[in-house]
Image (spheres, rainbow, N blue to C red):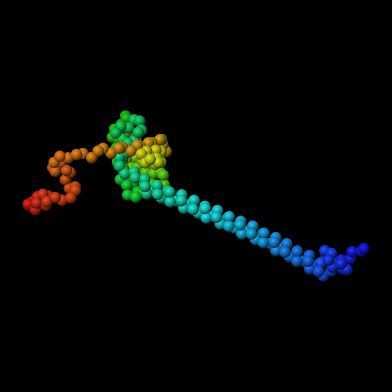
Amino acid sequence: DTIDPDVNPSWPGGGGAGVEGVGRKSDVGNRATAKSFWLAEKKTRSTLGQMKSLMRVVVLVGWAVGCGWAAEADLAGLWKNTAMGIGQSVIIVSQEGADLHVAGYGVWAGGGVGVWHGKGRIEGARVKLPLNYTKLPKPGFDAKVELDLGIAADGKTLEGTWKNSLGRKGPVRFVRVVSEAAPKVTTPAEVPAGEGPVSDGDKTEEAVKP
């Protein structure tokens, strides 16, 4: 028998019913393909959005950690310079937030006493301290020195480099001096004057003063 698509509508592609069937299958296939592309694009956009959000979180966490370190690094106190050739070399640090005020003293081998002061700031896990010597330990000593120090995780060491305005530089390391135990007093007279709450005795003494 001759199979004629026009005569045999049931044959794929033959007659009206065949054409409609193929058309419907084609439309369904196209819609399925389009839906697949749409879902893939949606998934890609979602993944990119998640990655951007994650990157924002990482940046914010890094910023918060840096700020937290700056806020938590308590450098106030006495620090000893471990450099060879400089005796009694210490700095005392006064701190207000991330701002530092320092004063230092040391005795140089082959020279004498050096005294300096400066103001600096905590920047993340580092400290930059420009110093000015008000008493030079030896002739020709550069009065302008800058310290660039890293803060140890335990807050007990400051280590980095020094450099002066003449281009010279070298390593430097400070260690925190452990505080001594508070002195014990046995009589009220041994208590430092002007400290602590005012007692009735102090009030009486002030009242009888001329």
Q: How many labels does the image show?
A: 0
Residue 19 shown left or right of residue 102 in the figure: right
Percent x, y of residue 118: 33, 44
Q: Is residue 50 left or right of residue 127?
A: right
Look at the picture and state if 43 lies above or below 175: below
Residue 24 or 53: which is nearer the viewer?
24
Residue 29's place in the image compared with 101, above or below, is below
Q: Position of residue 104 (x, y in %)?
A: 30, 39
| Most foreground residue, 154 or 103 | 154
Report whether 183 appears left or right of 134: left
Q: Is residue 148 visible?
A: no
Residue 45 image offset from top left, x and y in percent: 59, 58
Residue 152, percent across and down? 39, 40
- Quarter of the picture containing the N terminus is bottom right
Nearest the eye: 32 or 70: 32
Kindly identify the residue that appears in the image at 31 percent across and 44 percent down.
76
Work out whether residue 31 can be spotted: yes
Q: Which residue lies furthest to the top in this view?
A: 110
Q: Residue furthest right?
A: 1
Residue at (37, 36) in percent of width and height: 173
Dividing the picture into quadrants, the one containing residue 108 is top left
Q: In percent of the image, x 58 and y 55: which residue is there?
A: 47
Q: Residue at x 41, y 44 (%)?
A: 125
Q: Is residue 114 above or below residue 98?
A: above
Q: Is residue 48 left or right of residue 103?
A: right
